[in-house]
């Protein structure tokens, strides 16, 4: 009798969805791990201080962005499994109706390292591009000034020739106007162009810091508008004194500030 190649039936075991959460395939996580280490190592080596490292930074941050998207896909897939595992509870008892579970990646040192290196490279790249843009603007200003001087000389010479040829004042004026409007060549930056072609832009975040507190407070005291602005920071200023109020309690008393006592219920387990 010929042997059968059919594999014997494998006993099936029902998984208890209330206690079992399985994420598959496991190989997917292993691939993420390998890729994450390679991308992190690449980011660590990048300084973004010249054209070569600029190009390397663009490639590396694009890879890290894609990798973080894969990690987020891992999280959302896991969330689906967790919610599926919790679903039967709602059927078991009405108390669990509306229960929605999620998964937050609260502590993942290697992922945090990857994100920090990505941000460091992006900051270094932004600083490099800002420096390149500053140099480009300075060069453009120089070229513009040079073009204006050149235009003026040509306009004066052309106007003189036009007058000698019998042109009226209006015609001479129009000739000069057109010549003076001749634009200078546009100055470009290889770094800025490389970044732009790769979809990397340069923007600026504006902020402020108080470098002299005494001068600032004096300004606020003598300027109603600034005093109103300062009032918006009242909550932040109060938070700086809360720890003092906890330590000093009723003894806490300063001009314009007073301690605040709020009752709080405390219930302990019976022994």
Image (spheres, rainbow, N blue to C red):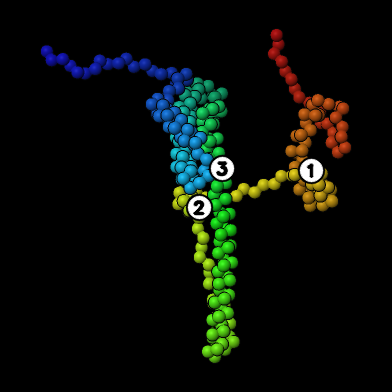
Q: 233 and 177: which one is in front?
A: 177
Q: 45 and 84: which one is in front?
A: 45
Sequence order check, earlier mark of 1 and 3: 3
Residue 183 is situated, as x and y percent measured from the top left of the image, at 53, 69
Q: Name the residue beneath numbered marker 2.
A: 192
Q: Distance between the residues labelled 2 and 3?
A: 15 Å
Q: Name the residue beneath numbered marker 1.
A: 213
Q: Name the residue beneath numbered marker 3.
A: 123
**Tag 2's secondary structure?**
helix
Residue 226 horizontal side relative to residue 70, left or right? right
Sequence order check, earlier mark of 2 and 1: 2
Residue 40 is situated, as x and y percent measured from the top left of the image, at 48, 33
User: Looking at this rendering, what residue extends furthest in the bottom direction?
Assistant: 166
Residue 179 against residue 68 in the figure, above or below: below
Q: Quadrant of the C terminus?
A: top right
Mark 2 or 1, closer to the camera: 2
**Tag 3's secondary structure?**
helix
Residue depicted at 72% across the width and 18% down the height: 267
Can residue 8 be seen?
yes
Residue depicted at 54% across the width and 77% down the height: 154
Residue 179 against residue 219 in the figure, above or below: below
Q: Distance between the residues labelled 2 and 1?
A: 39 Å
Q: In which quarter of the image is the N terminus?
A: top left
Residue 46 against residue 23 in the figure, above or below: below
Residue depicted at 77% across the width and 29% down the height: 243
Q: 100 and 133: which one is in front?
A: 133
């Amino acid at each position: 009798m010929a042997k059968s190649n059919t594999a014997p039936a494998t006993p099936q075991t029902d998984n208890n969805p209330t206690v079992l959460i399985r994420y598959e395939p496991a190989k997917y996580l292993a691939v993420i791990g390998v890729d994450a280490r390679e991308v992190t190592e690449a980011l660590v080596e990048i300084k973004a201080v010249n054209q070569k490292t600029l190009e390397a930074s663009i490639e590396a941050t694009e890879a890290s962005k894609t990798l973080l998207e894969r990690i987020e896909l891992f999280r959302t897939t896991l969330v689906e499994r967790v919610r599926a595992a919790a679903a039967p509870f709602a059927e078991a008892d009405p108390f669990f109706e509306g229960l929605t579970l999620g998964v937050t990646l609260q502590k993942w040192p290697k992922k945090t390292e990857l994100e920090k290196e990505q941000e460091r490279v992006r900051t270094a790249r932004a600083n490099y591009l800002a420096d390149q843009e500053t140099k480009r603007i300075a060069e453009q200003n120089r070229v513009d000034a040079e073009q204006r001087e050149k235009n003026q000389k040509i306009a004066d010479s052309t106007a003189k020739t036009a007058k000698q040829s019998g042109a009226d004042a209006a015609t001479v004026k129009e000739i000069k106007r057109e010549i003076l409007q001749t634009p200078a060549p546009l100055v470009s930056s290889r770094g800025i162009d490389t970044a732009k072609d790769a979809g990397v832009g340069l923007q600026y975040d504006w902020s402020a810091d108080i470098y002299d507190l005494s001068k600032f407070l004096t300004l606020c005291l003598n300027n109603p508008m600034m005093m109103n602005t300062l009032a918006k920071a009242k909550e932040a200023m109060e938070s700086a004194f809360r720890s003092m109020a906890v330590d000093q309690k009723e003894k806490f008393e300063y001009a314009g500030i007073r301690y605040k006592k709020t009752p709080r219920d405390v219930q302990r387990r019976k022994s």
